[in-house]
Amino acid sequence: MKKYYFTLFIVLFMGIIFGLFGYFNHGFQPVVGDTILGSVHVLRHEDSKQMHTYQTKQPFKALTIFVDQTDILIKQGSQYSVNFETNQKATVKVSDQQLEIKQKARYNFQMFYFPVIKKSTLTITIPNLTTIDKLNLSIENCRVRFDHLNLKKAYLNTSNSQLTFNQTKILDKFHTNDQEGNYKLANSEFHNIKFNSDSTNIDTNHSKMINLGIDLEDELKFNSEYSELTNLNLEANGNTTNYKMHNSKLLGNNKINGDETYLDLIHINQDLNLKFTRDENTSILYNNSNYKGDSLVNKSTTNSLKTISNSGQIKIIKLK
């Protein structure tokens, strides 16, 4: 009898699990894919809808974008144009020179994540030599590329997204609230930057970041090559920081405050004063030799970097 009730309990429990799965995915949907050669996708009712195209060629000076699961390209061109292809109902309008793009029904919660087959695409073209006053961007599971752009202010809320900036200038302010984001800068210049980040990757190449503040809640991976950072203030207390700076410069007053810090400064500018606050769990290698001091001072410069670390490794090779 006990075995009977136990079996009945298991059957009811599995029924509840499958029922919830079906509910959150809007019923048991067709499945496509190959379990050996490719991914398996659950086709939800949104995915089976036809794609809608929204377009406008009205001019604008500011952008507000709220989308999920979208590949976004914002670029220079000959004239203003917007082309948004999505299987979600959306709003695309220009009012008082402000472009607003919103998905009316953003992607629903799923008990398990499956990649969406028909990903939306958004292309925004801005005339050459035009400066956009303000960008408000709220995205999740998106890929965004900014190409040859000038913006005054940018405010971002991102989750699980990748953002690439190519030959882009943000002149006044760049603020972002980020969860598991990836940022790539190439030949770009940002001013007055503020990252409120969960887990973030930042890569810069031939770029400038001026007045850069980072408040870190989890883990940061920061790679900088042939770039200049001015007045870096990184607060990562209780978290892990992996910072690699190669053939680059730190200018002004810079500070890295972290619990577990791994810092590579390889072929950086010679005119930089370094000060270390650390415990015995943090080692320092200077020009490939163990360094026991608490500072490296060049009296002829005002450029400085102060590091505070409880554990990790700091490796320094300066330019000669």
Image (spheres, helix red, strand yellow):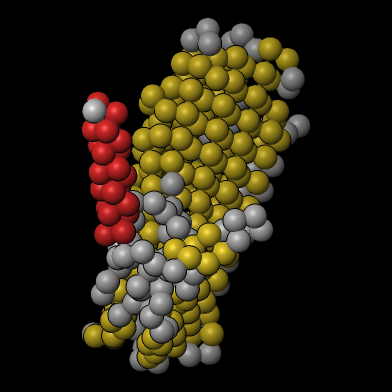
Q: Is residue 11 above or below residue 28?
A: above
Q: Is residue 187 above or below residue 265?
A: below
Q: Is residue 217 above or below residue 258?
A: below
Q: Residue furthest front?
A: 1
Query: Which quarter of the picture shows residue 187?
Result: bottom right
Q: Which residue is at a point 56% across and 35% down the rendered structure image?
A: 243
**Where is residue 148 drawn, in percent x and y?**
55, 72
Residue 45, image x and y in percent? 35, 73
Say which of 13 and 320 sits in front.
13
- Is residue 129 among the parts visible in the rendering? no
| Percent position of residue 134, x then y | 33, 69
Give the residue displayed 64% in from the left and 43% down from the top: 248
How many tags in the picture?
Answer: 0
Q: Residue at x 46, y 35 (%)?
A: 219
Q: Quadrant of residue 93?
A: bottom left
Work out whether residue 274 can be spotted. yes
Say whether residue 65 is left or right of residue 81.
left
Quarter in which the N terminus is drawn: top left
Image: 312 above or below 85: above
Name the image quarter holding residue 188: bottom right
Where the C terminus falls, by quadrant? top right
Left or right placement of residue 281 versus residue 317 in this view = left
Residue 139, percent from left and from top: 37, 62
